[in-house]
Image (tube, rainbow, N blue to C red):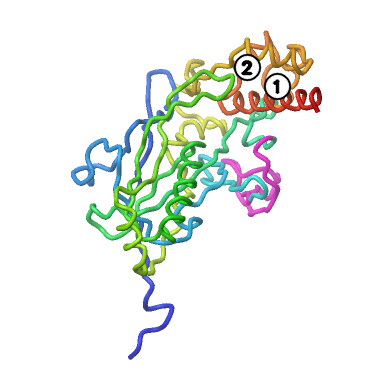
Amino acid sequence: MAPIKGVSDIRRLPRLGKIRLGIKVEEPKKHPYPRATDYFVIPDDIKKYVGDKPKELQILFPVEDTEVFAPQFLKCYSFTQGLVCRGDGVKATRKVDVETGDIANHTTEQWVFKEMTCDPDTCPQAVGDPEMSIRPQCRRVMNLLFVLPNVPGLGVWQLDTSSFFSIVNINSCLDVIRGLCGRIAGIPLTLSLEPREVTPPGIKKKTVHVLHLRSNLKLADLQRIAAKPPAKALMPPAEEEEAPEDLFPPEILAEAEGLPVGEAAQEQEGEPEKEAFHIDLTWLNESLNEIKWTEDTAKTWLVSKYKVSPAGTLGEVIKRLTREQAEQFVHEMQERVAKKQLELFG
């Protein structure tokens, strides 16, 4: 009997586990918070194959479709409801409380999915809203699914990242490899975590660890491999209903919904650690003079945009911003300065 075309030649791979890019740090009188590592955090049962703290992994992508093996969305999680909103910056699918019409939370008894617009610059779940007691719970997330050919077991491993630089880097590397080989599926690749100095204008220089994709094979060998048709396989969907703990610690999600999380939650110093940032105030003052803004104008803009407290000096208001908000503010200043210069020389 002949096999069924389009069915008998397809293989479905199970998900074997998760590899992480950080650890959850727990300190006395503080909420647990995620801390990025400069190595891959590996499950104990495969450390003997890849090392205790590897900075490189030999991987394969078993399918060609990037949306299958590297889906990337803006995601909002709830401690009690799991994934409650997923969007692409334009449209989102949200889990909505039937009774209140708000995003589902621990008080929700019945909910429905609702299609709506997605604007991470204004959405309360993305930027927060102190007046409504809403803390930011939405982050960009890429779920990377791949095979570890040197590890026993037939299936895929999942790695989640919310790093802007890693997401852009992976997408760029995939385009380069596809351009050289004509495909990505079945190509032996090295996934690495490498230091990179980042110096956004107006922000203090820092070192981050960014995902990279490359191959250690010669181009001729890569093209020889790419010339062979890859086996067909079906990937499991990315595990996204449960919040990645290294990106969304459950204690932080619980507090965001007003749920008790132990004695540490009652301590003022128990606030989750924020990623440090620094805006060069000399550069900022020069930019404000260039666009004819006073410090009060800048404070008003920040308070309106990010719903932070207006108390204190401009520098004190800036310290209440997250790193992402500070970078957005710097970008806004750059654009306004550039526009003003075009007006002068246009």
Q: Position of residue 305 (x, y in %)?
A: 71, 27
Task: Give the CA distance from mark 2 to mark 1.
Answer: 8 Å
Instruction: Give whichever of discs 2 and 1 has the lower sequence position.
Output: 1
Q: Position of residue 90 (x, y in %)?
A: 67, 47
Q: Does dot 2 land on a helix, a strand or a loop?
A: helix
> The C terminus is located in which quarter?
top right
Q: Which residue is mark 2?
A: 318
Q: Mark 1 and mark 2 in contact (Cβ < 8 Å)?
A: yes
* Magenta-span inclusion, residue 113: yes
Label 1 CA crowd tier, 10 Å (few <14, some 14–19, many 20+): many
- The spot of residue 275 in percent (x, y) is 49, 23
53 w.r.t. 87: above or below: above
Q: Residues within 10 Å of mark 2 (few under 14, many from 20)?
A: many
In this rendered view, identify the residue nearer to me: 165 or 134: 165
Which amino acid is tagged 2? Answer: Ile
Q: Name the residue that disc number 1 marks.
A: 302
Q: Which residues are magenta?
A: 93-121
Residue at x 37% of width, y 40% of height: 20
Q: In x, y percent, where is residue 44? A: 24, 42
